[in-house]
Image (cartoon, coloured by chain):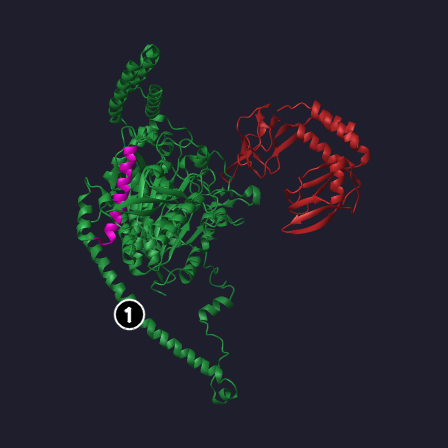
Amino acid sequence: MDIDKRTRELAARLTYIRDIFGPRENASVAMLRIRLEEFLAQATSLGMRELSRQVGLLEELFALLEGKLENELTPMDRVRIVRHPQRFCLKDILENVYDNYTEIGGQDEWSIDPGMLIARATIARRMGKKTVHQSVMVVGQEKGHGQEYRNAGSIKPWGNANALYYMRVAETENIPIHSYVFTPGAFPVEDYPGAAQQIARNLYAMAGLTVPIVSVISEGGSGGAEAIALADRRLMLSHGYYSVISPEGAAAIEGGLKERASPELIAGCATRLRITARDNLELGFVDRIIQEPALGARPEHFDFFRQLRREVVRATDEVVHSVEGLGPLRGMAIRRQASTGDPHDIFVRWSLGQKARAKLVRMRFDKYRAMSRAACRDNRTLGARLYSGLEGLLWAAHSALRHDFLARHKRRLLGLLEALEAEVRALRQGVGGPIGRLLGIGAGQQRRMEVAPEALELLTNLSCAEDCPCRLEDTWVYVSPKSREDHVVTCPNAATHGCLDLWAPDLFGEFAGVCSHCGHHFPLEFQWYLYNVFGFGQAYEFNRELESGNPLHYEGFDLKLEEAKRRTGLGSSCITFETHIEGVAIMMAVLVSPFRGGTVGAAEGEKIIRAAERARLKRTPFILYSHGTAGIRIQEGTCGGIQMPRVTMAVRRYIEAGGLYLVLYDTNSYAGPVASFLGCSPYQFAVRSSNIGFAGPGVIRETTGTDVPPKYHRAFSALSRGHIQGIWDRRDIRKNLHQALLTMGGRNLYYR
Amino acid sequence: MLNVKEMLEEINASPYEEIEIKTPHTGVVEFVGLGLGDRVTGPSGKWLERPGTLLAHLTREKNKKPICATQKGQVMDIRTELECTFVEAGERLLTIRHFLSREEVISRILKKALHLFVAPERAKYYFVPEIDAKIKASGEQSVKVREGLDMFIVSRMKRETPLSYSGPEGIIYAVYFQQGDNVDGGQPLIGVCPESQLSLIQDVVNRVQGEWEERD
């Protein structure tokens, strides 16, 4: 009986090894297979003692060769390991790492999203003879062991929303959150609130959660991972992967989306993207690696679970220790245990005081702010850097003096004057009867407000034909080069709306690329917006010297990058500048699509963060115009992916400081940026005829197996779903922006 | 009186529909190499989002527009003499012969033979209890309808209003909705035919079902 069981286990181990190594020929795997087959063939003729000896030998051989095979694992093999149904899952962790748990996010298939598991768990810790049960909120993707309803840990928007809800509960109850990332990526549906919008909400909320968050990454695929992985300590399993995109997705983009990528290309992408635990540790995106047994941990590896328990407890202790002063001896002990100590020996209470909570959020921001800073090219001279630092300090001082100190007194004085004026008005109204008339007080109350003569003229004179055509709104500073082509253009809505063909010089010149019949917006160059809407001619551009680089030394990418720089004359896909709209100073960041599809990498992230910080210092509104973005730049790997939490945290900091963060979408905006720093804005508007979403129709079809309707990603669909707050005509953007500047935003805008 | 025999003969004599593809406006025509007898397809996809087979290009003011097939069928009578010439709007370029499917034939016959009573708005529709009981007991063809007969209850947003039948007198040939399901405005609720023609129509439909040969 025992022999049978051991033999079956060996067969299962061999199947696992063969699954991991795929179709690759490998001498060790072949040897294991032959030895096992030989043993099974002669097993019937052997006695019990001999059988036991042979099985023992085979087990030793398996252990030996598994150790050897461990060194031969390629990044793609690791991807296969984390996706294997025999790999441990979150339920195994709950059973083996925690002492007790209750699932609260649903049970098995009876859940709003069976892929997302949420549980209240406890860890028992000893303090002398006393046992203290420390509560934690566990959230994570549950892949199960091949259950189809788990959807392989691919989470729908409502699953992420549920996780966020319970993370907020944890914050209310002041208990730490342990998040376990087991996802190949989010399920790309746009049903309310949309995959991108929900991930953005999760990131925004997690950036400000005032309880310790520890995340453990096994399979961290793109936006789906970011939805729960923003943490104070990020641990990674040695056989896991953490990447901005799945290797299959990267290969599909590399090889052209039309054809299915070959296994070699997928494996090549897995290597080039630097997705393994060691890579991520070197790049600084995870804090520690938890070593798994050879060829990855499986549910029967109980030693591994003990180690995992030690690590998550230690990480939580460290977070608490970093923000809340422990006793000097315990602090010293925690520092010393980094190498060998058992965290159970040092008791740390995990609930935080008010000050520690605020410090925790600050430290989390600093942690992410420091990541990937070296992943872009900073071409500034030392002098320029010093000047920039000094300028920041001066602006901080100026801001504190002008807006905090002087403005406070000014506000108080104005408040007093206002109250006085109101008193006088009340007096005039109170005595506005016969006495008031007698005294002449209150006369002129009915007088109309003064109107400026120029405005009056504009309102009353409909035309000034003797001078020139009286047009103010459609005289453009920048005219699209498309308007120089002599041909007519057909509106895509012609079949349904009966639009007449338009002559290109009219359409792209005077009409600003808008169909005069149905209002369809033809795409225009980003320069059109820069000069006609944002007054780039008079603007001050900053951080132009920050340029995109190739931090992962991705093969062939340097050439592509140089070509993009040469063609566009830009150093990155982001332009940041200060400008004015109707006299109001604003901070702008523009993502331009001609530069590598408007993708966001480390340089773009850094530029947006610096712009948000500058806007905070100068107390100006911060407007991000997305002329088009295809997502995160995959060639930068996790250096690009990490911009999602990084930039979201920066804009959250800006919004909380009382600013106005407004996002305007145009043409096509998809994926990571929409699922983070664009989607987290409370004021999101779109230029008509733009498309907004998480994944394009092709990716949705490939991932979910369902077709999407033709206008699924259109701005009007996004408006109906509640993703954006309004749709603007291109010709009215400046007017609408001015209206937004006056009516939206927080308390700390300089002109308020 | 419906002449079914004549109708069937007419359909059998030309079991197809001829679709003339005409130029929507002036321009220079360029055919894409289709020949006589070539098969083309109409718009496809769940939302008909993929256009049909490309038939020709029409260029006006340097704006080259595709002209695509609107139905599945066979190319007949292609006017190759127009290749690279300037044509007026409404000029016939080619003809597509679309062979009728079984469903299309039946729907043509029923369209001529039946009076369709359509839903005035999107709502749930129910028969009034008396008619409902009669249909359940003896089938829908046992119900005689006449102008002004209270037939339906329209249920929408917790409001229930009666709806009377309007149209020629006859019996219900077919019911096109499920009780309790939402029906869009403009969709048929029932098809009515004169009592005398009931067996005739049934006979024709059965014959088409059994004998019609699908060509495509």
Position of A43 relative to A60 (above/below): above
Say which colour chain A has: green
**Front-lying residue, A312 or A605:** A312
Q: Which residue is drawn at 25% across and 64% down?
A: A398
Q: Is A307 included in the stretch rendered in magenta?
A: yes
How busy is the neighbourhood of tag 1: few (under 14 within 10 Å), some, or many (20 plus)? few
Q: Position of residue B82 (x, y in %)?
A: 58, 30
Q: Which chain is red?
A: B
Drawn side of residue B69 relative to residue A545, left or right:
right
In the displayed structure image, the side of residue A401 where residue B107 appears, left or right: right
- Residue closer to the observer: A246 or A489: A246
Residue under the point 29% across and 40% down = A309
Residue A469 lies, with reference to residue A496, above or below; the image says below
Which chain hosts label 1?
A
- Point out the image quarter for the C terminus of chain A: bottom left
**Which residues make up the magenta segment?**
A302-326
Residue B114 shows in the view:
no
The residue at the far front in this view is A129
Nearer to us in this view, A513 or A308: A308
Quadrant of image for the N terminus of chain A: top left
**Callout 1 amino acid:** Leu
**Residue A296 seen in this snapshot:** yes
- Residue A53 x/y as whole percent: 27, 16
Question: Could you tell me how many numbered marks the image carries?
Answer: 1
Task: Write down the residue under mark 1.
Answer: A406
- B89 vs B99, nearest the viewer: B99
Question: For residue A450: magenta?
Answer: no
